[in-house]
Image: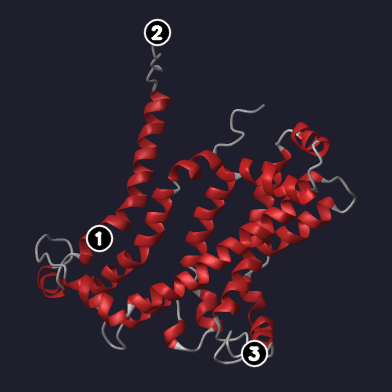
Amino acid sequence: MSVDTPVRSRKLTPMRMLLHGFLIVVSLAWLFPIAWAVLTSLRSYDYTAQNGYVSFGGWTFDNYVTAWRTAEFGQHFLNSVYITVPAVLLTLFLASSVAFVIARFSWKLNLVLLGVFTAANLLPQQALLIPLFRLFTEVPLPEFMSDSELLYDSYWGLILINVAFQCGFCVFVLSNYMKALPRDLYEAAMVDGASIWRQYWQVTMPLCRPALAALATLEVTWIYNEFFWATVLMRTGDKFPVTSSLNNLRGEFFTDNNLVSAGSVLVAIPTLVIFFMLQRHFVRGLTLGASKG
């Protein structure tokens, strides 16, 4: 028979009231643009043009139907899937492999290797624009991998560029997490005759699920929302990811902000779904080690 222990309520001091008030204000500030975009997307342009955006009325779902049809979101969503899924899986696999080597073995170049992978996050991507563009236009690919027979204007190009820039952050996070794993696990695995590969795949990787889930959530969000490299390394409109297709909703002389808001909400839905699916693992991965001294 279990006895419920009473929960002690913390005294509400002026400092705690000030902290709660600050957190509420910050939360509302973060939620306001999202709520405003949803509200705008559900209203007709004619009504807002006549009554202003600070008004209520003119409710309609036509903006979502028009945005989906005009921007061709169906095809561009698939393009984002073709780019995001392989890029995230490849990033996590390569980053976990490097992190395992850094955390598992002690050798002179450990810090140098970690510094090489994390250095990519310190360099502005725009600084590499010209050399990478020239490189992509000169690297050939088989015709079945790219219509242009080049790394330029291909899904592979965007996959590789995202993997290159995202690996450093993932290596940094995973290496620190793996260093906290008990060394006894590896010693027991070696006694049982486990190879290095089995120690990595069957011992380390299952224990890294919270960290991998947290990184997967972040990487899906970052790569899915990536806009810069898609506009630089792509030229065929049918291959652009969904974030780039939002430009189709903007006219040369006129922009329907209600329509753009509807398109933005449609684009944001997949990342929200991924976040809520992995929310439990995401929070656990962020709070790992918080109670360790």
| Nearer the observer, 183 or 160 | 183
Which residue corresponds to the image point at 65% horizontal and 85% vertical from the top-left?
136
Give me the disc on residue 38.
1
For marks 2 and 1 on the same chain, the one whose residue lies earlier in the sequence = 2
Amino acid type shown at disc 2: Val
Q: Residues within 10 Å of mark 1 (few under 14, many from 20)?
A: some
For marks 3 and 1 on the same chain, the one whose residue lies earlier in the sequence? 1
* Residue to which mark 2 is pinned: 3
Q: Residue at x 21, y 64 (%)?
A: 40
Q: On the rendered structure, is 61 left or right of 113?
A: left
For discs 2 and 1, the disc positioned in front in the rendered view: 2
In space, the residues marked 3 and 1 are separated at their CA atoms by: 40 Å
Answer with mark 3 or mark 2, whichever residue precedes in sequence: 2
Q: The N terminus appears in which quarter of the rendering?
A: top left
Res. 243 in view: no
Looking at the image, residue 145 lies above or below residue 103? below
Spatial CA distance of label 2 from label 1 is 47 Å
Q: Where does label 3 land, which residue? A: 137
Residue 289 position (above or below residue 238): above
Q: CA distance from mark 3 to mark 2?
A: 70 Å
Kind of residue sitting beneath label 3: Thr
Q: Characterize the local packing of mark 3: few (<14), some (14-19) or many (20 or more) Cα atoms within 10 angstroms.
A: some
Q: Amino acid at mark 1?
A: Val
